[in-house]
Image (cartoon, rainbow, N blue to C red):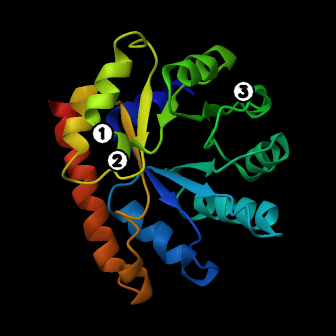
Amino acid sequence: MQDMKALLSEKKIIAILRRVPAEKLDRVILALREGGVRFMEVTFDQSSPTCLTDTAAAIRRVGELAPDVYAGAGTVLTAEQAEAAAAAGAKYVISPDVNPAVIRRTTALGMISMPGALTPSEVLAAYREGASYVKIFPAGDLGPAYIRAIRAPISHIPLLAVGGVDLDNMADFFRAGICGFGIGGNILKKDLLARDDYAGLTELAARYTARAAELTKG
């Protein structure tokens, strides 16, 4: 777990794989990995009756195709989903809310918990329950100034920025106190997927990982 935390501190980016068509999944995983991505979050599609098995299969596929990538589960709303993610090989669980049952089950299964929060009260509640990181969502709408403001009393808690993070604002969020980023549509662009432009996806991923490397170097 400490190795994973150290790598996340260095790489900073978790690529969010949301509703990637099954027939494109393998090429997406490989394209992102070639672009330097070492953390991939596969989200549960709560509107799908087969989300439990589909997401577990996708997480397992990340591990098979890219064993040097840390796979995680996203949009985890129940302990059952956390269990399915763990069985598939997930190393961390990301949720949109602060659900004590999910946080506790995640940590009991040996995974890192990254629940979502908005206010300082929610951030502290998540951390008290055992979260290793707390994601601030939607970060893009709130902005770096909000991060700076809430960091004053909770600077000991590692925060991730998710939602609306792009190449232009990554540095601002980092300077505000963010230690990592969850990035979905701004890396996994719909137009690139639509035309099967996996080389373009790799190139874009490489731009994000290069920007994160610049932040690490200072």
Q: Give the amino acid type for the residue marked by disc 2 in the picture.
A: Gly
Q: Is residue 36 above or below residue 113?
A: below
Q: Give the amino acid type for the residue marked by disc 3 in the picture.
A: Thr
First in residue order: circle 3 vs circle 1:
3
111 vs 182, left or right, is right
Query: At 22% from the left edge and 59% from the top edge, which residue is drawn?
Result: 207
Q: Mark 1 points at which residue?
A: 143
Q: Is mark 1 on a helix, strand or loop?
A: loop
Q: Name the residue under label 2.
A: 140
Assign the C terminus to one quadrant of the image: top left
Residue 208 screen position, x and y as percent: 27, 54
Q: Quadrant of residue 63?
A: bottom right
Q: In this view, does 56 lie above or below 143?
A: below
Query: At 74% from the left edge and 45% from the top edge, which residue is drawn?
Result: 77
Q: Name the residue under label 3.
A: 107
- Crowding at dot 3, Cα within 10 Å, few <14 / some 14-19 / many 20+, comes out as some
Q: Nearer the viewer, residue 97 or 207?
A: 97
Q: Give the amino acid type for the residue marked by disc 1 in the picture.
A: Gly
Distance, label 3 to label 2, CA atoms, is 28 Å
Q: Residue 44 carries which label?
A: none
Mark 3 or 1: in front is 1
Q: What element carries label 2?
A: helix
Q: Nearer the viewer, residue 73 or 139?
A: 139
